[in-house]
Image: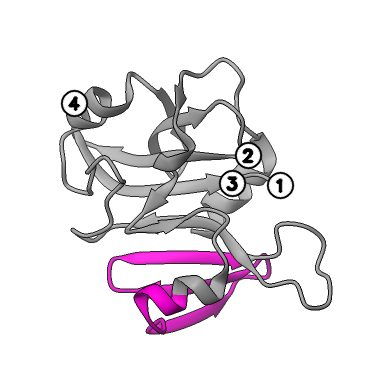
Amino acid sequence: MRYIFAIALAIGTPVWAATIPLSELQVGHVASGERESRVIKRIGEPTKRVDTGEGTELHYPGLVVTVGWLDARAPNVERRVAALQGTGHRACTPRGLCPGMPISVAKRLYGSGELIHRSYGTFLEFYPKEAGCWLQLSVHAGLVQSVGVACST
């Protein structure tokens, strides 16, 4: 997860990509930018917390929610969701795309997207028009391995 977050910070959102609605930047009913307290109220306490140095990963079965300060850390400012990665069968987008589904379903729901090859995996990415976050699918052998939302600052 921390690698996705680091790459997100480095590359930003391409302007040439087809757009998706901002409402699709959710995984397992957790939205990018959502307050940490709201996440915990909705889905409960995480099974594990991991400090990454860039934020804190909240681990749930089949879902990792990374929270941090989206702006400079300030007193009385709550951390917000900066990245999501879902591998469980409930880690779906609002349109119903879940890990384990064929890539063809993702393309039917969201369009062709951008296929990105990195040293640690292949990703199919979909971008909204005006946001620093995007839908990021880890793909292999024609299947969606994970559904995520990555954000740049």
> Label 3, on which residue?
151
Q: Is residue 98 left or right of residue 79?
A: left
> What is the CA distance from the residue labelled 4 to the residue labelled 2?
26 Å
> What is the CA distance from the residue labelled 1 to the residue labelled 2?
7 Å
The relative height of residue 35 versus residue 5 in the rendered view (above or below) is below
Indicate the amino acid at tag 2.
Gly
User: Which badge, 1 or 2, comes first in the chain's sequence?
Assistant: 2
Could you say whether the residue bearing mark 2 is in a helix, strand or loop? loop
Percent x, y for residue 74? Answer: 83, 71
Of residues 119 and 24, the one nearer the viewer is 24
Could you say whether the residue bearing mark 3 is in a helix, strand or loop? strand
Badge count = 4
Pick out the residue farthest to the top.
Answer: 16
> Label 1, on which residue?
153
Indicate the amino acid at tag 1.
Thr
Indicate the amino acid at tag 3.
Cys
Which residues lie in the magenta part? 40-67
* Picture disc at residue 102: none
Q: Residue at x 71, y 64 (%)?
A: 69
> Label 4, on which residue?
104
Indicate the amino acid at tag 4.
Ser
User: Which badge, 4 or 1, comes first in the chain's sequence?
Assistant: 4
Asked if the residue under mark 1 is in contact with the one under mark 3, i.e. CB atoms within 8 Å, the reply is yes
Q: Residue at x 52, y 53 (%)?
A: 32
Asked if the residue under mark 2 is in contact with the one under mark 1, i.e. CB atoms within 8 Å, the reply is yes
Percent x, y for residue 59? Answer: 41, 74
Q: Is residue 101 left or right of residue 31?
A: left
User: Which badge, 2 or 3, comes first in the chain's sequence?
Assistant: 2
> In which quadrant of the rendered view does residue 130 lie?
top right
Asked if the residue under mark 3 is in contact with the one under mark 2, i.e. CB atoms within 8 Å, the reply is yes
User: Which badge, 4 or 2, comes first in the chain's sequence?
Assistant: 4
* Picture disc at residue 132: 2
